Structure formats: structure tokens, C-alpha cells
Amino acid sequence: MFPGPNAKNPGISQHQRDFTQLVNWSGIRAKTLGPVLVFPHYNCLGQALNHAIIKPDRPRDRRDKPGKVKYENPRQRPNRVYIPAGARDALLAPTAVILITEGIKKALAATQNGFPCISLPGVWSWVAPREKTGGRRIEPYRLNADLECIEWKARRVVVIFDSDAVSNADVRRAERALTDALCRRGADVRIVRLPTKLDGGKNGIDDYLYDQGVNALRQLVADAPSFRQKINVEPTEFTESGYTVHQGSTYYCTLAKDDNTDEFIVAKKIKLANFFAKIVGESVTDDGIEQTREFTIEGQQWGKTARTVRIPFDRFLALDWVMERLGPQFVIQAGSGKRDHLRAAIQEMSDKDFLSATVCTYTGWRKINGQWCYLHAGGAVIPIVPGFSGVEVRLDGAASGFRLPPPPSGNLLHYAVRSSLGILSGLVRDSVAFPLLATTYRAALGNCDFALWLSGPTGVQKSELAALAQQHYGASMTRGQLPGNWSSTDNALEGLAFTVKDTVLVIDDFAPSASRADTDRQQRAAERLIRGQGNGAGRQRMRSDSTLRPSKPPRALVLATGEDVPSGQSINSRLSVVAMRNGDVALSRLSECQRDAIDGLFASAMAGFIAWLAPQYETVRTGLDAERIELRDRFVGRFPHTRTPDIIANQLIGLRYLIRFAEEIEAIEPSEGQNFWQRGESAFRAVADQQSENQRSADPVERFSEMLSTIVSSGRGHIAGRDGRKPVFPPSAEAWGWHQSELCNAQGKSDGNYQERGRKIGWVADTELYLDPDSTFAALTELAREQGQVFPITKQTLYGRLKEARILIRSEGDRTTYPVTLEGTRHRVLVLDSSTLLGKPGQSG
């Protein structure tokens, strides 16, 4: 009739005929309740108590106030404590932490999420019967028989009633009485105050777990203050070094043997502080590169409530944190050596088996007990791993939005995945949609060395599309809540990109500014971040002791938006630039996709993808390079920079694994997957061709002829004949930077009716052009500056590349210049074909 004592299910659904005797009800009365959920009670050994609480399908009205009676207790029988099956092992282990709450559903929710918890039927239902004296019950409250049989001595107990305990005096009295009774049994009792809900409603432990997650409750439990009765400890117990606590103060005692009794007595007692403290826990904060240790310390003064603080290891030794963190009333006595003694006293008086945990401060893949898990702000996508209960994730600021839901299954997973694939259906042209979605899933595979850049004028929905990608990693990161912006500092962006490992990180709004300083700052930030991601290197920093800290490179896949693209060939070669135009986005489809993203469907699809990936991640991770090379070879030779085929291959890997995942879970048919792949390949070829053109336009060698022609035609520089006068070579003097002048100044240099424009940058003779290296480079850098850019390479590098490209037709040995006699003087010049400036036959200069 009822599940056994070790059943995982908390209760069973029954009709009236089966439970009337158990709850001491009449059959006629029971019929009015309809089917019920029965919660049979067992003791901590799993023995049936012949007691149950029921939750009816049709609850009856309350007699004295509005509302329904949600749970029914047996009539005319004492209340019993409810112990979920999952909490029994903890009750039998004397050192295991136990939670106490009111309500079966709350205890079950806590226990099923890894917090062994027992339930009281009511806040006063733990009290054993008390005899009356003179018509009054005056003896102390004692635990009832169900609680009395549990070993409480030295056990940590956390009392966690509903959030309205703050405003309900009766609940607070019951909580205090329960705490006193447990302390008398030797328990270390902590009290957790749950916050109210955002709408002001009451919060129970089950509600809090649902809304905030396991890590949030674990943090509340860890931070809960210790409830202790007033202490009155005489100095009868000493640590190995002679430290003790007397009336709440810490002392250092020297002991001497009494010659008469041969017993040790206190020969000298030195007060160290007007409080005592001990280490009650430690945590190791792990950012994936560097680990830092932190102590949880409980400090207390005589007759006052203990205070709990967290102190980094490197600050603990100096004790400079006492007044700052505990308060000015916590006083360390003056005197040489007393701080050292107090530090030693805290260590020696601390429990040897205090709680220890590892706190991860990053997202992405982490190996725990031999199994790969994916961390996020809510914990891990694969939380059921032996030993995982000792690891928590703590993300602050913008990183806290990277929170995935539990992975769905069945039809829910199919629906979520098809919603994500909907980005490829009618939202935007394929050459935008496929790079966007493929990059989103490629990020989850880890180890990406490129960035996706959505460029285009304002109003083309760049940020909206980027938000759809971002919401695969957290539904709350909408268009108005994107985690990154180019207006942030360089350090902030680099730190965030390091923290949100193996995710897409949107950095929004790279736009030209009226301020040159702002434009230069954005350019520097982009260059630092993209170069660091592409090279897998972060800025070197030093510790205070002059030793080097480990570098912390960007570990996210950056998805940037902007009206402009960073300048420089090196940066552009690390980007997959997708240019958007007005009218690209179908606004009706965008609204549908945004609703799916806000509802968490995209994040659910990503959680399902990662859950599918986890068991095979070791194999996938090892084989990524081979897959990249295989796909890259299809594009080698098509592009001016060798990074471009790698970027395309990486994006195709993301698409390949997305399609494979969707097919294996049967969210799509194989024919649909093949269609997606063919469309994707075509889209990436179009993107790659555009990328090739962008890189050529950013290559200073490719732009050299164009910039040189601009310098001459705009009057910024001119070319002279070999004798320094107006050149006589075709097509005309104007083509070499001279203009006809009606009036010639006697002091001006002129030749007939022609006068030079701008500085002299070279000479021409027949078909050869001789450029002065310094004047030419100065003119190039000035032109770049006037265009709001910085010339990306040095003079030596530029001329070396011109030589490699065989644009220099004559040079001497390893040098880029060649000696030529011009205007009667020997000059070392760059020798080019004159068509470099004028253009080849049939072209304009």
C-alpha cells in the first residue's frame, strides 16, 4: 500500500479506502477529499511509525479563517517529525549537517537538492509534553521523542523557517526555543533568514531553491551566523601553547608546576584580545589559472552574538582585518608580540575538521573527479558527479547573467533546439545567420582564437541579433542587458572575457566618436582584447613582492557589434567580419526569436547541447585540431591571410556539432541536417570572399600604391624630375603633383608656368620612380592620421614587405634602398616602376 522506507518517491497517490485508518478518519468524511497524496512517516532507522500526513486533491475549507487546509494530520494523535529517505544517512552520521524546516514539501526539496533536511509539522511541533505546576507549564522546552533519539552533540544544525519569521513574533519565539533546546544537547546551531520574494511574497526553502538555485542556498547556509548561548568558560582548558578563553577574552598563559601538589598552575596570564575567534571553514577560490585561499572566521565577545567573516589567506596573518571586518569594539591588546600570539591562538583553538570547499569563479568546462562538467552561474550543467557537492560557482557583476537552466529532455528539448535553429529560417540572410549561430555553438566547444564582428550602420539590428546569440548562455542577457560594451575599460573587458570561459561574450557598440581620444581608446581596447584572444595571451602583471602573476588571457569567444571595424591588418585577420545592411532583418521573425530567447528556449537548447556533449567531451576536445585542419584545407589558397581558412573551419565545426546533436536527439531529420550544412558552406564562402576583400584593403602593402597616388593627387606631395625640376615624362606634369601657376613668386620654386604642390617625396626618370624613404613614409603616416587611423607598421617593415612583394624593382643586397644620383647628389632611394603611381596601361593613376 505504501512505499518502502528506502523508496525515492516521497509519497504515493491513493484513494480514500486505503488511508482512512492510517489518518483516523471516517470513510464518509474521507470521500469528500477525493484522491490524496500520502506521506508515510519513518524514523531515522527507516522503521514505519504507522503515521502519515495527506495532501488531498479537494482540500476542505478552514473553519476559522479564509483558505483551504492543504495538509491533513491524523486525528487525535500526536505530531511526528517527517524524515525524508534521503536524509536518514545524514542523521546516522554524527558530524553531518542537518537542516530543520516546517513543511514536508520544503524538506523534500532541500533533501533532493543535496541538503539533508527534516520537517516539523509546525514551528512548535518539536516540543515534548510538559507537566503543569500550579496550572502553568514552567519547565524548559525539551525535544520530543522523534528528535530526542538523534545524536546532536557537536552536529551543525541549520534552522530555516519561512521568510515571514522576521515579522512573526510567534515563529521567532519558537525558533529561539528550538535553538536553545538543541544547544543544550550540544549542537552548533545556525539560523538562516530567507529573503522575501521580489514581489514581497513569503519565501520558503523550496521556493528559494527554485528561484535562486542550489549555490545561492549553499551560500546562505555557509554564511549563517552561529547561535550560541552566553559562554562562561573558566581557564581550565589550554591549547598546546597555553592559549585559553576566559569570559570571552583570549589569553596566553604560562604554566608552572606546583612543588607541593605536582600539578600545573597558571603562573602568568596575558590578555591578548577582548574577544575570541576561530576558523570554522576555508574555501579555495579557483579561476582556472590561479587558486587563492580564504578562511571563514567566527569572532565573538562575551555574551554577544558571534560574527562570521571571510578573510583572504594573505590578510589573515597580519590581523589588520579585525577592526575593519568585525568592528571597532573588537580590540587587540597593545604590546609587542601580541598579534603573533593571537594569530597562533586562533589557529590552535580552531576545529581541526572545519568545512572546506572549492569555489570556482569562472564558467566553462572543468574536470571534476574524472568527469567533464560545464560550470555556469547556477552551478553546473552536469551536477550529479561524485564529489561535486564540495564545489560551488560564484560569479559577480556582468558574469552573473551566464546562467543555464537544467537540461531538458524529450519533446521539450526538441522544441528548444528547433527554436534555436529558427535563427536560420527567415530571420536574416544566410551569410549573417550561419556565422551567428555556428559561432554561438562553437564557443561551447572551447579553445577559440577568433572573434565574430557584426558591422553596419545604426538601425540594422546588430545588437538585437547579438543578443539572440548571447541568450543561449543566459536568458536574462537581453538587448538592454548585454554583458559588455566598448565604453568599458580595457581591464574590465579583459577580466570579463577571462571569466566567462567557453561562452559567447557580446561586446556592443564599437562606434566612431567625435572625440579622437575616445576613438583611439576603443581602438586600443579592441586591439588588446582581440589580439589576446587570438594569441591566447594576457597582459603580464606583478604581485606586490615583484613576482609575476600568471597571465589571464581572454577565454570567451568575443562577438562584437559596431558601426565600424578596428583598423589594422593584424586585427582584421583575427576577425570574422559580417557586414549588415538596412533591411537585412525580418522584424516579425526577430520578435518571435526574441520571445523564444526570453522564455529560455535558447538557453535550454544550449544546456541540452552541453549535456549531450559532456560524456564525449574528452574525445571531441582531443579531435578538434584534426577536424579544423580537415575543414581548413578546403579554403587554403583562397585568401591573403592564413588565419582566414582557420576561422571558417572553426565556424563550420560549430555548425557540424549543432547539426549532429540535433540529428542524434531526433529534433531534425537527416535530410534537414544535410540542407543546413549545404546552406552553411555556401554562406561561409560568401563571408570568406568578403573577408578576403576586407583584409586586402587593410594590408598596407596592398594600399601602398593607392595611398601614394592620393598623396600626389591631393597636393600633399610631388615628384620631381631627375634634376629637381618639373618632370617631362608623360602623361603630364599634373600627374606628378605639379600645377600650372599664372603668377610665380620670385622666391618660389617654379618651372615655366608650373609650381610643385606639397613636399618632394621622389623623382621620376623614364619608367623608374625613385622615392625618398623618409619623406614618403612621413607623407603616408600623415595621410593615415588625417583619415583617423594609425599607419599599422614601421618604415622598415613596410619597405621590407614591398621588397618581398617585388614592388621594389631594384635594391642592394639585404637593403631595401638603392644608390642613385639625383640633382647632382648621391641618394639612397626606393626604386619602383612608375606604373606604381600612375597605374598600369589602361588604368588611371
Image: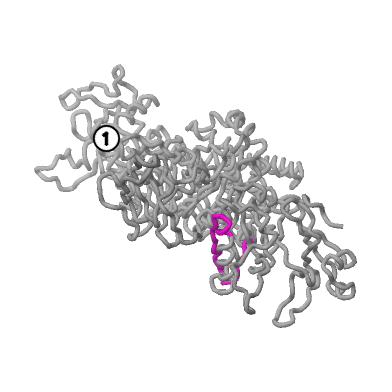
Q: Residue placed at 28% from the left, 27% from the top?
A: 830
Q: Residue placed at 66% from the left, 43% from the top?
A: 658
Q: Is 202 part of what is drawn in magenta?
A: yes
Residue 299 in picture, x, y percent from top left: 42, 54
Between 197 and 528, the one lying in front of the other is 197
- Image quadrant assignment for residue 546: top left
Q: Is 759 part of what is drawn in magenta?
A: no
Does residue 727 appear anywhere in the picture?
no
Is residue 567 rendered to the left or right of residue 370?
left
- The secondary element bearing badge 1 is classed as helix
Q: Main secondary structure of the magenta part?
A: loop
Between 803 and 591, the one lying in front of the other is 591
Residue 534 in picture, x, y percent from top left: 46, 37
> Pointer 1: residues within 10 angstroms few (<14), some, or many (20+)?
some
Residue 489 in picture, x, y percent from top left: 37, 51
The residue labelled by disc 1 is 776
Q: Which residues are magenta?
A: 182-205
**Above or below for 400 versus 503:** below
In the displayed orientation, state which residue is furthest to the left.
746
In the displayed orientation, state which residue is furthest to the bottom.
64
**Above or below for 564 versus 447:** below
Between 810 and 200, the one lying in front of the other is 200
Residue 428 in picture, x, y percent from top left: 60, 53
Between 348 and 572, the one lying in front of the other is 348
Is residue 829 rendered to the left or right of residue 393?
left
Does residue 115 appear anywhere in the picture?
yes
If the image is split into quadrants, where does the N terminus sit?
Answer: bottom right
Q: Amino acid at mark 1?
A: Thr
